[in-house]
Amino acid sequence: MDLNGKNGGVAPEDYEEPQCLLCDPEDSLNRRIPVSRVIEKLDTYIASRDFGSAERLLVYWRGEAVSIGDKGGLLTVLNEMMGLYRNNGFNEKALESAEEAVKVLETTDFGGDPSTGTTYLNVGTVYNAAGDPAKALEYYDLAKKIYKETLPQSDYRVSGLSNNRAVALARCGRFEEAREEYKNALRVLRGSKHELLESAVTWLNLADLAEKELDQEEAAEEIESCLNKAESFLAAVPFELDAYQSFVLKKCEPAFRYYGFFAFADELRERIRKIDEGT
């Protein structure tokens, strides 16, 4: 049973590769799955909300990567599986993919590659979504260590880690640490490609943090300030028929509605509709 609730297979064009006439078909050494083409096809399925085909594609290529011993390709597929399952509420399947990814990392030396940190970040996010923020922090801390060793701290990926780590810290009642992580995310986002969208999400997260930490009167003032800043960032985002923009706005719209910013929430809903309908 797949994410669309039905059985199905992967079409030949999703997996067939031109054969090298000089290659020994029994030789699996140095063989790799076509990661770029798999991701391209996956993005097409996700954009059309065909999650069942997306799952079947990833399951097929997971098997291929295992069969030829392509651990790098396997890790890429497992990362995509974690995201697909988590975003669709399949926490058990997401955890299975996360556990498998950790085993791959534990048995493979990727030479201090930042992608190792990104995998730990994704594993942590799966545990956070599954309701285990303490376990999530263990993996976020591993990711933080690797990012410090392999990336400039102005790298966009650092902001993603800070945002996710802050959510877990807040759920563990470590509010001041969470606030510092959010502020770090905002610093890193300055001038980045996704500054407007991602900064808006961070300010909405800061509003949620204030609600959890402060009394009602103090929280009301801080929440309004955070919402105003989030609104200003989103209002500055140029309208594009872009799936990523739709994805972020869908995360933001309920928060504005929850805090009583109904008019702006309606604007976001209309923008989402236009993006999804291609108008």
Image: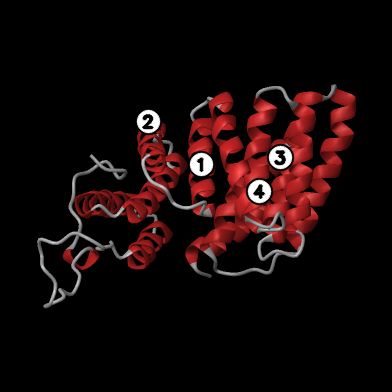
- Up-down relation of residue 174 to residue 12 (above or below): above
Residue drawn 41% across and 61% down? 43
Q: Nearer the viewer, mark 1 or mark 4?
A: 4
- Up-down relation of residue 140 to residue 52 (above or below): above
Residue 220 sits in quarter: top right
**Residue type highlighted by circle 4:** Lys
Q: Quadrant of the N terminus?
A: top left
Q: Which residue is mark 2?
A: 92
Q: Which residue is mark 4?
A: 148
Q: Give residue 120's mark.
A: 1
**Residue type highlighted by circle 2:** Glu
Q: In this orientation, which residue lies closer to the viewer: 75 or 95?
A: 75
Q: In this orientation, which residue lies closer to the viewer: 237 or 195?
A: 195
Callout 4 secondary element: helix
Q: Which residue is mark 3?
A: 205
Residue situated furthest bottom in the rendering = 21
